[in-house]
Image (spheres, helix red, strand yellow):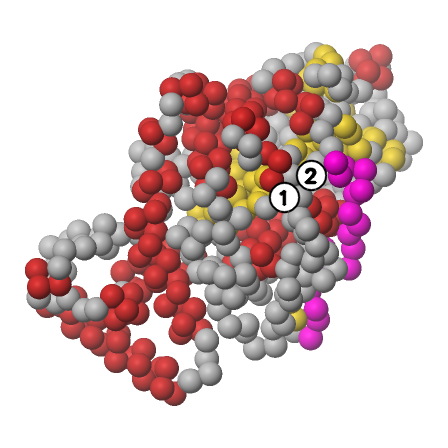
Amino acid sequence: MLDHRPSDHRPWAVDRREFLWTIGGGFGGMALAAMLAEQQASAAEPQSGARSPGKLPHFPPKAKRVIQIFVSGGMSQIDTFDYKPELFKRSGKPFEPGEKVELFESVPGVIQPSNWPFQRQGECGRWISSLFPHLGTCVDDMCFIHSMVSKSNLHGAALFMMNTGFVMPGFPSMGSWVTYGLGTENKNLPAFVVLPDPRGLPPNGPVNWGAGFLPATYQGTAFSTRASTRAIQNLAPPADERFSPEGERATLSYLKAMNVEHARRRGGDGELQARINSYELAARLQLSAPEVVEISQESQAVHRLYGLDDPVTAGTGRQCLLARRLVERGVRFVQIWSGSANAGFPRQNWDGHENMVNNHGREARLFDKPVAGLLKDLKANGLLDETLVVCTSEFGRMCATQGGKGRDHNPFAFTSWMAGGGIKGGTAHGESDEFAYKTAKDPVYCHDLHATALHLLGIDHTKLTFHHNGIDRRLTDVHGHVIEELLG
């Protein structure tokens, strides 16, 4: 923590502005990652060639903020949300769709129906797998999209597409676009916070929540979700006997001289002020972040709701409870990751190549209760109506077996769901075919999902642009339509 004693107790003291101006190196990479707009889309001057997003929102929003839950590895639509009774009738028979099937790492085996029984849930009567007994009680607040399509069956490319709208790296993530357009509601916290799986980072790592060609102020700030580690690394100055007050003062004085000279030579350059903003945010975070991540102050009933009392669900429960605490404090965009890219077997994500029962059975136990707890807690606290929850994977899985017990990747049809924030709950949109192999009605790409999310935030997706390399870029590229049927 910063020392707030009177300056005469510190022989090396400098005034607040001088300290914040020059202390940047002590906060490491975290400070740069936390640069954000303190007012709507105005934390930093636009980079050369950039254009302002204009006056936003474009129209009254239904949602003020977003929680995106990303299920990494490829959740099987067949075993979770997309009930296909025809697969039970044809179980064990060859999969013969009448065309060549190109899979990621196998050839199609025999037809395999869901490994778990389905039953109708809620007043809406949606079919839900027994993998999700807790989420099944929330279906009246959820809208399922059964006709999602990706352009790649490779994890890296498909993750890029779902996060940024492009299969190649280098483009801004959805969270970056949202914070670029709308800024923040809390100047003491980052506008875009990422909560990785406690087991590790997903494939592609931090590039998934990067700002691409947008100013760095809009990239996500990752919080640690491991209970045993500090939530934000490199936030507080290190306690190290090698750093003396005299040496620190000399460093600060030298940095100040460099910054003054930089400002003198580049009077119209806003990047220095942007850096100062980021360092000031880092200083404020030293006071605000500890309170946000201190979940012990929540009641035992809340801990039980999120599964924090169970070692199996405690990791995801901590992620979900942190997400609620962040959005209620005005954080604009929170991304929760389920699944990591840590090497070894069993896989620590939803990539069920070898054994679906073991893989999805394990991951669903980690996921089900905490995510249901998040939806219920948001609703009980009056936050669900103004918080859009989006849950998706990069693609789905095949109806035919891989190696007898697993399923290979399927980019041609999978399921995402949305809740809260203006969504019509208890409904479904689009359909896959009888095998859940390809879409049969109303195909939905990430661009349509992004356009719909932006619409609920009061943004016309065609008008949220950034001029880069001679092109007015946008999250939805040249595609995307608002899915009107989802809107409540």
State whether the magenta stretch is mostly helix, strand or loop.
loop
Quick check: 369 above or below 322?
Answer: above
Based on the picture, tell me whether residue 486 belongs to the magenta stretch: yes
Q: Earlier in the sequence, mark 2 or mark 1?
A: 1
Q: Position of residue 474 (x, y in %)?
A: 69, 61
Question: Which label belongs to residue 105?
Answer: none
In the picture shown, does residue 357 fall above or below 45?
A: above
Foreground pick, 254 / 98: 254
Residue 91 lies, in percent from the top left, at: 80, 14
What amino acid is labelled 2 in the image? Answer: Gly
Q: Secondary structure at mark 1?
A: loop
Q: Residues within 10 Å of mark 1 (few under 14, many from 20)?
A: many
Q: 144 left or right of 68?
A: right
Percent x, y of residue 81: 71, 24
Q: Residue at x 48, y 65 (%)?
A: 43
Left or right of 371? Residue 146 is: right
Q: Is residue 197 visible?
A: no
The verdict on residue 8 being magenta is no
On the picture, is 445 further left or further right than 440?
Answer: left
- Please identify the quadrant where the C terminus is shown: top right
Q: Could you tell me if residue 309 is visible in this image?
A: yes
Query: How far from the left and from the top, in percent, is residue 462?
Result: 74, 60
Per the image, label 2 sits on a secondary structure element best described as loop
Give the residue at mark 1.
63
Q: Mark 2 Cα within 10 Å, few/some/many (few <14, many 20+)?
A: many
